[in-house]
Structures are given as C-alpha cells and as structure tokens.
Image (cartoon, helix red, strand yellow):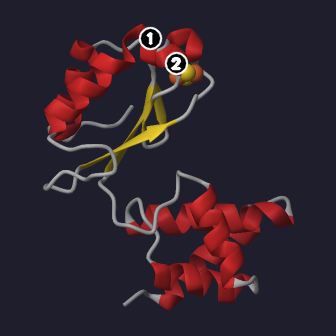
Amino acid sequence: MVDREKVHALVREAKSESLEEKDILINTLHKVQDYFGNYIPVEAAEIVAEELVVPKSKVYEVLTFYTMFSTKPRGKYVIRVCVNLPCHVTGGREIVQTLKELLGVQFGETTKDGLFTLETTSCLGLCGVAPVIMINDQYYGDLTPKKVKELIENLRSGGDAR
Ligand code: FES
C-alpha cells in the first residue's frame, strides 16, 4: 500500500522547485523513485497523475520513454553500462563481462541481495573517457576490469557511489 500523503508531499515539493510547468512531472517522478528506492510503484504513478491532474497515460508514456525510470523494483545501485560503439571498442566488452561475473546477473536483472541492478544505456556523451558506466547518478570513465572490481567491492562494503 502506497502512502498517498507521502506522494502528495513529494508532488508539492517538486512543484515548488520546478521553474517550468513541463518539468514538474519529471521532477516529481524522480522524487517518487528516490523515495521508493530506484523504482516507481504503479499505484504511486497513478497518485502522481491524480495530484498533477494529468492523464495516467501521459505518466506511463514518460515512465516508459525514459530508461532512468522503472516500475519494477530495482537494486539500491542501478549500474548502467554504455553499450554504444566507442565504449564497446575501448574495453566495454570486458567491463560488461566483469560486471556480469561479479554480480552474477544479466542485463535487466537484480542481485539477490537487492544491491545491484544491471542495465544498458546508449551513449552518455562521455566517449572521450570511454568505456563509461553510470551508478545511480554518478558517471565513471576510463574504466578497466580492475577499477570496476574496486567500485563494486567498495559499494558492497557500504561505500558511497561517488
Ligand atoms: S559511446 Fe559510451 S559514452 Fe559515448
């Protein structure tokens, strides 16, 4: 059961922070997703639609268009691996392999401990430091399998994704 009052408060907060009308929905969805831990329950999305007086279909459209949003529970850390060519040919393949081995999951899956979800992304605009991944909102470039192992170990031991 989703706490309607909490979603209502997040909508209010987003409204007060958004400079333009068109940013309110996205800003709200970010806040709701952060609150629920990297995903947006369908019930919460419906409350957002009611609170903002926008059609539910509009909210679903935004949720499915932007890969940063998910209506499926995801891990505490969402790892997005750039799979476009510049990253792929500069070691991205090894990064993917290392992550899959370390985490024991495939793309689209979450580790059993609920810590990590592995996803793909298209170019993050940082090809100059390829290969690149994102962990939640943080970018990591010039990666090697060794650096990836260190990052994952750090997060597993309670470190920050920064
Ligand atoms: S191709 Fe990976 S950041 Fe551009």
Per the image, the residue denoted by label 2 is 85
Q: Secondary structure at mark 1?
A: helix
**Circle 1 crowding by C-alpha within 10 Å: few under 14, some 14–19, many from 20:** few
The answer to whether residue 127 is left or right of residue 15 is left
Image x and y of residue 135, in percent: 40, 37
Residue 8 visible from this viewpoint: no
Checking the image for residue 4, the label placed there is none
The answer to whether residue 91 is left or right of residue 100 is right
Considering the image in quadrants, where does the N terminus appear?
bottom left
Real-space CA distance between mark 2 and mark 1, rounded to the nearest whole angstrom: 6 Å
**Circle 2 crowding by C-alpha within 10 Å: few under 14, some 14–19, many from 20:** some
Q: Residue at x 38, y 67 (%)?
A: 72
Q: Quadrant of residue 131?
A: top left
Image x and y of residue 32, in percent: 52, 69
The answer to whether residue 56 is left or right of residue 36 is right
Per the image, the residue denoted by label 1 is 89
Image x and y of residue 157, in percent: 14, 38
Q: Secondary structure at mark 2?
A: helix
Between 61 and 8, the one lying in front of the other is: 61
Between 77 and 154, the one lying in front of the other is: 77
Q: Amino acid at mark 1?
A: Val
Image x and y of residue 59, in percent: 65, 74
Q: Residue at x 25, y 53 (%)?
A: 110
Q: Is residue 146 above or below residue 76?
A: above
